Image (cartoon, helix red, strand yellow):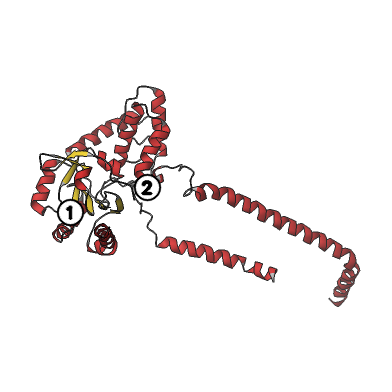
Amino acid sequence: MADRSATHVPAIIRAGQRRVRAWSRLLLLALVLVSGHALAVIETYEFSSPELEQRYQALSAELRCPKCQNQNIADSNAPISQDLRKLLHQQLEAGAGDEEILDYMVARYGEFVRYRPSFDGATAVLWLAPVLLLLLGIIVAALTLRGRRANSAGAAALDADDEQRLRELLTRTEKES
Amino acid sequence: MAPRLKLFLPLILFAGMAAFLFRGLSLDPQALPSALIDRPLPEFSLPALGEERTLSRAEVIGEVALLNVWATWCPSCRVEHPYLVQLAASGVPIYGLNYKDEDAAAERWLAELGNPYRASIVDREGSLGVDLGVYGAPETYLLDAQGVIRYRHVGVVDERVWQTVLQPMYQQLSAQGSGG
């Protein structure tokens, strides 16, 4: 859920005139965009090149909203996300590289703001856990399979020895019943 | 012995998971430590609320102090305000960061509710806010005498927060400052 207020206690949206104007702009935009795709971005930015716009979309999808936590800044309507989108636009237009922008955000909001955190001591577990768990699974599966094969081989050997006894037992139970 | 132990493996795994999950119950998923802990307060040059001067980093550092991010549009700020006034009266230096607010409303607020701040930095665009990693209001930063950020509290500072969280650190930092 998007927490739209900038306050740390969720509640109360300031009904300032600016807001009203922004919302009516959003409504207009929504009408225009009704055609199909659900880009939840409210404001539109002009980009000097389509390549920049593409990078903007990619970065705003990868940056996480610090306020709402389970949304990226492209989807979030929280004031902080609006601010970060504005910053992102400014930095892209100023010619900053992707890494530079991500470093800027991480320096202020921590690795938390990246949906793909960089690999370091603190995030190593995060990145390596899937591989390690897969390896562990393969090892367990291999051991189990090998154990089962050894068991069934043993069982076959027993069969050869005890076939006679087994047959006797079977005939005995048949007679008894 | 080994096969016997193997039988206990599921139980051991369960106990391990239960321990982690139980710990998880008491963790706050919203808790987000500041990226600026143990980093210096960023440089800035912004106007002071209700005064004809600009404030910079040098003017708010020098002693252990609180930097409180507030705004008139923030209902929780109104909740914590009386306690800040009380804290300031007891001698704790508090600086304000008036975050994305309107000056007139902010000055009226301070006139009506009392002014706990030594000075309030006016951050209309939220630029210092971004440099600090602010993502809402209220937030309260604990600065040491060298202007290094030692802690950030997100949300209302009340008596409980002050006594259990901020005051111990505040006193420790103050003692260090006067000791060395």
Q: Who's the residue at 25% across and 57% down the image?
A: B177
Residue B128 occupies quadrant: top left
* Residue A39 visible in this rendered orientation of the protein: yes
| 10 Å crowding of disc 2: few (<14), some (14-19), many (20+) | some
Q: Position of residue A57 (x, y in %)?
A: 40, 32
Q: Who's the residue at 31% across and 34% down the image?
A: A87
Q: Secondary structure at mark 2?
A: loop
- Amino acid at the residue labelled 1: Arg
B170 and A46: which one is in front? B170
B159 and B131: which one is in front? B131
Label 2 marks which chain's residue?
A
Q: Position of residue B31 (x, y in %)?
A: 35, 54
- Residue at the right extreme of this rendering: A164
Q: Position of residue B24 (x, y in %)?
A: 43, 60
Which residue is the site of mark 1? B78
Q: Position of residue A136 (x, y in %)?
A: 62, 53
Q: Is residue A29 above or below residue A73?
A: above
Q: Secondary structure at mark 1?
A: helix
- Amino acid at the residue labelled 2: Gln
Q: Is residue A131 left or right of residue A144?
A: left
| Quadrant placement of the C terminus of chain B | bottom left
Alpha-carbon span between mark 2 and mark 1? 25 Å
Which residue is the site of mark 2? A69
